[in-house]
Amino acid sequence: MSLQGKNVVVYGAGGAVGSAVARAFADEGARVFLTARTLDGVDTVAKEITAAGGAAETAVVDAGDEKAVTDHLAAVVADAGSVDVSFNAIGISPRELQGIPLTELPVENFLRPITTYTRAHFVTAKSAARHMIAQQSGVIMMNTPEPARLPLPLVGGMSVGWAAMEGLNRALSAEWAQHGVRTICLRTTGMPETPVIHTVYGLHADAIGITKDQMIAAAGAMTHRKRLTALSELTAAAVFLASDRASAMTGTVANLTGGIIVD
């Protein structure tokens, strides 16, 4: 198992991406520490992991609260001895943020994803890096969808927030890779298996006057392989990139968009 003996912290572990990544890491031998702002859903994920023979623990942590994050990581390190992977999978509701022309979008709604995402990712990365630099190893991971790079309409400040995450990923690596700390961003398309994407595509479909199914089909048609990223493809890549087999990869974006974006 490629992550045997690794201690992994997942933020936003109650969501579709966070819970799937946590299960995949546990399946590969990692001990996973699941966090979210509430334990709704997170305890269920932890029970599923332990029932399958894995090791999982839960805690209430707001990823944007630096004290809460640092206190939790201190407790993890005191108990487990290290923090080897930090995966921030937090999300925010797209309602009132997407499907609205920029000329009609309130400034505070434009700024919300930019400030929320950049703050939370900086807080969790900074807090984890303090432990990882001391131990001279670790991986910090995040996930963005294709509007981080691809210009698409009606996404409001989301695309700017996601682009900022990718820029942050490069900046973190420039300072920390020399100390053994790798930073990786996984860029996907929208994943239809996740409930939030159905909400997003519904908002966009309503805005342009088509059905949600038509919107999903059109998005898939933009890829070279004519289908959107699957959640299992994200988790398989995350496991590899978190492992020592990807030791040369840092400060980079793993392009899992199926050809919507060609690097």
Image (cartoon, rainbow, N blue to C red):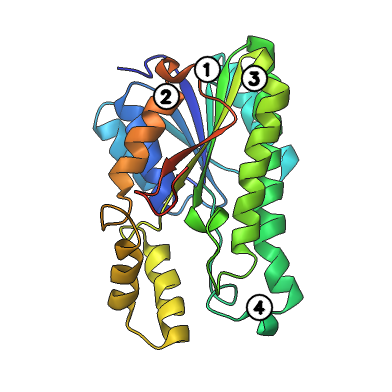
- In this view, 127 is above or below 121: above
Per the rendering, the mark at residue 80 is: 1
| Cα distance between the residues tagged 4 and 1 | 47 Å
Please tell me whether mark 3 sits on a helix, a strand or a loop: helix
Give the mark toward the camera: 3 or 2: 3
**Mark 4 vs 2, N-terminal side:** 2
Per the rendering, the mark at residue 177 is: 3
| Cα distance between the residues tagged 4 and 3 | 38 Å
Give the mark toward the camera: 4 or 1: 4
Place of residue 208 in the rendered image (x, y in percent of width and height, measured from the top left): 44, 85
Would you say the residues marked 4 and 2 are in contact, meaning their CB atoms lie under 8 Å apart? no
Few, some or many residues within 10 Å of mark 1 (<14, 14–19, 20+): few
- Name the kind of residue labelled 1 in the image: Ala
Which residue has dot 4 on it?
A: 102
Q: Residue 73 versus residue 89: which sits nearer the camera? A: 89
- Name the kind of residue labelled 2 in the image: Arg
Which residue has dot 2 on it?
A: 31
Few, some or many residues within 10 Å of mark 3 (<14, 14–19, 20+): many
Give the mark toward the camera: 4 or 2: 4
